[in-house]
Amino acid sequence: MDRRQFIKTTVAGAGALAASSAATTLKAVEPAGDDKDLRVIQRTNAKNGDKVSLLGFGCMRWPMKKGDDGRDHIDQEIVNSLVDYAWNHGVNYYDTSPAYLQGQSEAALGEAISRYPRDSYYLATKLSNFGDASEKASLKMYRDSFENLRTDYIDYYLLHAIGGGGYPVYRMRYEDNHMMEFLLKEREAGRIRNLGFSFHGPHDAFDEFMKLHDKYHWDFVQIEMNYLDWRHAKEPRNTNAEYLYEELDKRNIPIVVMEPLLGGRLAKMAEGAAGKLLERDPSRSIASWAFRFVGSYPGVLCALSGMTNMEVLEENVQTFGDFKPLTEEEIDFLMEIAIMLDSYPTVPCNDCKYCMPCPYGIDIPGIFLHYNEMVNTGKIAVSREQKDYQKLRRRYLISYDRAVESLRQADHCIHCGTCVPHCPQSIEIPNQLQRIGDYVEKLKRGEL
């Protein structure tokens, strides 16, 4: 055992003892029901031997509730119950960030997961220094993560969402402020067990980061991968997942997958495409096709899912507990579904909420999600000659008012552009808001 491995083992052991002590004072819940013996399958990280659950818990979409102060707060009780079920069914990879859920995600995860022995799960978090990339602010963010997560080491640490802005922005966030030098030392000391990055961006930017592999030796990389983005990513601002996967796989870099469902868009899709999936296999959910797609590629170590309620969590545990890879013919079938989905006029929003809060109060993801749902379910008015036009017109306007408060709707956007650089999907958000706002105004006036 070399020095680095010795340090890692020592730190890991100390962390496990501390977490075990905490677990004796905080109650964890045993699973109930017929599936209590079901465990999601694991994959072995060839670089370090970690046994990682193929299903990972993405902690970006936990349920929120209004507090006494009138603000949104994570519902800790529900989070605890979700983590209990996940942990008891073998989910051992938990991915968070200081930027998620208005800065509350890390602490909520720390409270929930610290009830279990530290060596029974893997923590992944990020240096999300988008707003202030100074050395002082970045160091504080890094150290706060340890406190929030109640740990003395982090298993998988990521440079968050590099790619947008290319190498110059990466250099400003991580090299000019000496943070890469610092993080490499932290990896050597064992406080970071694996160092990698999450990527959103163009083809040439990814190639630049692959060139850095010889220098930094990335331990893993997190990419957006699903059967729609496999060959239909919105290039040139984003890169097809097929290319990302192949470049990482040939370098033997373990892959963590984000957005296997595209923010739910591959679970609640256009009725025509959904019907084809259900006709093909009525016994399986629409979402399970997307999860089986990413899990069918051996270079994928873990696929993250933002599970907001117990129903979704239970369904995903079933998919990954009784996991069946896709055949080549089934993958070809999904490629046909992807072509169909790519033709729909939806907004490629994944509900990540990186664009929020809007300085003018616009509910950007809420507007896009409502619009996409209406398009996908065929409940959208397109002309006065359309059958049931008046019914569809009224339905859209009423449902829009219910989904998004009037003062937070698209027509209040002033095109300040604050949101644009934060969108991992490179959506021209003000333009899309204007398009939807104009559509709503035409519906109100009956001008379509």
Image (spheres, rainbow, N blue to C red):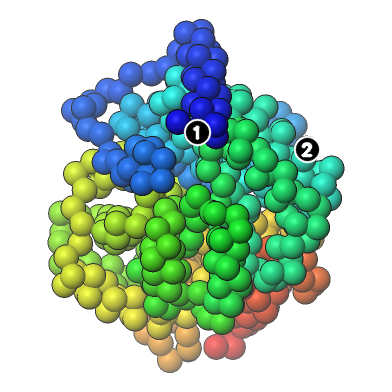
Q: Which mark is residue 192?
A: none
Q: Tell me the CA gap for discs 1 and 2.
A: 30 Å
The answer to which of 137 and 77 lies nearer the viewer is 137
- Judged left or right of residue 113, residue 287 is left
- For label 1, count other residues whose C-alpha is less than 10 Å away and answer few (under 14), some (14-19) or many (20+): few
Q: Is residue 282 above or below residue 412?
A: above
Instruction: Give the residue type at disc 2.
Output: Lys
**x and y, in percent, of residue 231 in the image:** 39, 77
Question: What residue sits 70% from the left and 39% below the top?
Answer: 142
**x and y, in percent, of residue 70 in the image:** 72, 36
**x and y, in percent, of residue 365 in the image:** 59, 60
Q: Is residue 104 visible?
A: no
Say which label, 1 or 2, has the lower sequence index.
Answer: 1
- What is the secondary structure assignment of the residue under circle 1? loop
- For label 2, count other residues whose C-alpha is less than 10 Å away and answer few (under 14), some (14-19) or many (20+): few
The quadrant in which residue 355 appears is bottom right
Residue picked out by circle 2: 140
Which residue in the rendered view is the most extreme toward the bottom?
385
Question: What residue sits 48% from the left and 52% below the top?
Answer: 220
Question: What residue sits 44% from the left and 56% below the top?
Answer: 253
**x and y, in percent, of residue 86 in the image:** 37, 33
Q: Quadrant of the N terminus?
A: top left
- What is the secondary structure assignment of the residue under circle 2? helix
Residue picked out by circle 1: 2
Instruction: Give the residue type at disc 1.
Output: Asp
